[in-house]
Image: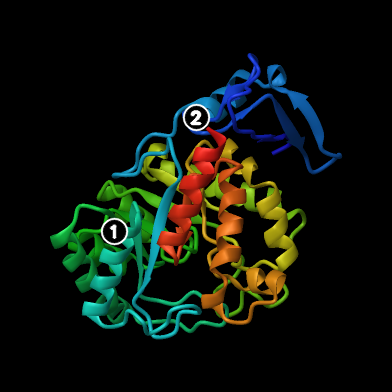
C-alpha cells in the first residue's frame, strides 16, 4: 500500500464547517496525516481525500452484538487461568469467575472477554480440553444470568465452538486467525463476529527481540490483509473488530508509536479495540512493578486512545475506566 490516511482527530463544540465526523462518534477532523513507506509524513486538508477514503472514515460503524459505537465501549477482562500476568488464579473457580463477571457488568462493562489460556510473554500452550474446561462452563453460567455480550479469547476452533455453543457472542483471536485454520471458517459458518489482533510470534517467544520495518504501517498492513481474508471466507466486514495488539511482539518504543498514531487504524473501516490494560510498558513508563498497581496508567492510555476515536477499551478495572471515560466525554461535549 502506498498511501495511508490517519485522521487528526479533535473533540468539542467549536467545530469548523468543513470538519468531517468520524463515523457517528465523538470525534471530528479537518486534516489528515498522509503516511507512506517512501517519504516523510504530510498534512492535508480533508478536501484532498478520495471519495473512498472519505467514506471509510465517515461511515457509521455498525453495531456488533449489543455493542454500539457512538460512545466508547468497555470490554471487561475475565481470565479463568492460573497464570495470567495480572490476575492469574483469581477467577479459576467457577463461582469466583461468575461473581467477577457480575461485578464488571454492574461497573459498566458492555462486553466481557473470557480467556482460558494466558497469552503473557513466555506463556506455555494449554491443551484444548483444559481450555474448554476453564471457559465453557463460565460462559454458560454467565449467559443464563445476563444478555451481555461475551467474547471468547482463544486461538483454537474447538474452544471457540464450545464457547459459542455455551452462549458466547464474539471470538477474539490474539493470533489474528493465523494459528488454527479451522477458526475463521467456524466463525463464518456460525455468523459469529470476530476481533482480529496483530501479534508478532507466539506468546512463548514474542518478546524475543521483535523487529519491524515501520511498526505502525506493518501492523496496519497485517490487519488489512487479515480483514480481506476473513471477508473472503464469509465473515461480514461489519462483524469485524481490529486490535493492533499492544504488547504482543512489541517493544516499549513500538507500543508508543502505535498509540501515538492509533487513529490510522480507522482507515481499516472497522471498529478499533485497544488492549493495553496493566501491561509491562505502562509499568516501565511509571516505574510500577506490580501489574495490579498500573490502573491509573492504564486509564491514562485509554483516555488518550479514545481521544483518537478508539471504540473499545479492554480493561481489568472496569469501574475506574468507566468513571474516567464518562467524565472525559462530559468535558469535551
Circle 1 is placed at which residue position?
106
> Secondary structure beneath disc 1?
helix
- Is residue 70 something one can see in this rendering? yes
The picture places residue 165, in percent across and down from the top left corner, at 19, 61
Quarter of the figure with residue 98: bottom left
Distance Cα–Cα, label 1 vs label 2: 28 Å
Q: Which mark is residue 319?
A: none
Mark count: 2
Which circle, 1 or 2, is nearer the viewer? 1
The picture places residue 112, in percent across and down from the top left corner, at 34, 60
Q: Is residue 246 left or right of residue 322?
A: right
Badge 1, how many Cα within 10 Å: few under 14, some, many 20+?
few
> Secondary structure beneath disc 2?
loop
The picture places residue 95, in percent across and down from the top left corner, at 21, 78
Tell me what residue is drawn at x 55 percent, y 75 percent: 293
Circle 2 is placed at which residue position?
23
Which mark is first along the chain, 2 or 1?
A: 2
Amino acid at each position: 500500500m502506498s498511501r495511508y490516511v490517519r485522521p487528526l482527530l479533535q473533540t468539542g463544540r467549536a467545530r469548523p464547517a468543513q470538519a468531517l465526523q468520524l463515523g457517528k462518534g465523538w470525534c471530528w477532523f479537518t486534516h489528515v496525516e498522509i503516511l507512506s513507506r517512501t517519504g516523510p509524513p504530510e498534512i492535508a486538508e480533508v478536501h484532498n481525500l478520495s471519495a473512498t477514503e472519505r467514506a471509510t472514515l465517515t461511515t457509521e460503524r455498525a453495531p456488533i452484538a449489543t455493542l454500539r459505537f457512538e460512545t466508547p465501549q468497555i470490554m471487561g477482562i475475565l481470565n479463568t487461568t492460573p497464570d495470567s500476568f495480572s490476575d492469574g488464579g483469581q477467577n479459576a473457580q467457577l463461582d469466583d469467575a461468575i461473581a467477577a463477571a457480575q461485578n464488571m457488568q454492574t461497573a459498566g462493562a458492555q462486553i466481557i472477554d473470557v480467556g482460558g489460556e494466558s497469552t503473557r510473554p513466555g506463556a506455555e500452550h494449554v491443551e484444548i480440553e483444559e481450555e474448554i474446561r476453564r471457559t465453557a462452563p463460565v460462559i454458560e453460567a454467565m449467559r443464563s444470568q445476563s444478555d451481555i455480550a461475551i467474547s471468547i479469547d482463544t486461538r483454537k476452533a474447538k474452544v471457540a465452538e464450545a464457547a459459542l455453543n455455551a452462549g458466547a457472542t464474539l471470538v477474539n483471536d490474539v493470533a489474528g486467525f493465523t494459528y488454527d485454520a479451522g477458526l475463521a471458517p467456524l466463525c463464518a459458518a456460525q455468523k459469529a463476529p470476530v476481533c482480529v489482533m496483530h501479534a508478532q510470534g507466539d506468546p512463548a517467544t514474542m518478546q524475543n527481540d521483535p523487529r519491524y520495518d515501520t511498526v505502525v504501517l506493518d501492523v496496519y498492513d497485517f490487519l488489512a490483509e487479515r480483514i480481506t481474508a476473513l471477508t473472503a471466507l464469509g465473515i461480514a466486514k461489519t462483524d469485524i473488530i481490529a486490535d493492533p495488539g499492544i504488547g504482543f511482539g512489541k517493544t516499549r518504543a513500538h507500543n508508543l508509536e502505535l498509540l501515538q498514531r492509533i487513529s490510522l487504524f480507522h482507515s481499516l473501516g472497522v471498529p478499533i479495540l485497544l488492549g493495553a490494560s496493566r501491561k509491562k510498558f505502562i509499568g516501565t513508563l511509571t516505574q510500577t512493578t506490580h501489574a495490579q498497581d498500573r490502573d491509573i496508567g492504564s486509564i491514562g492510555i485509554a483516555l488518550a486512545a479514545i481521544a483518537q476515536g478508539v471504540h473499545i477499551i479492554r480493561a481489568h478495572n472496569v469501574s475506574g475506566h468507566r468513571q474516567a471515560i464518562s467524565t472525559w466525554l462530559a468535558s469535551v461535549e
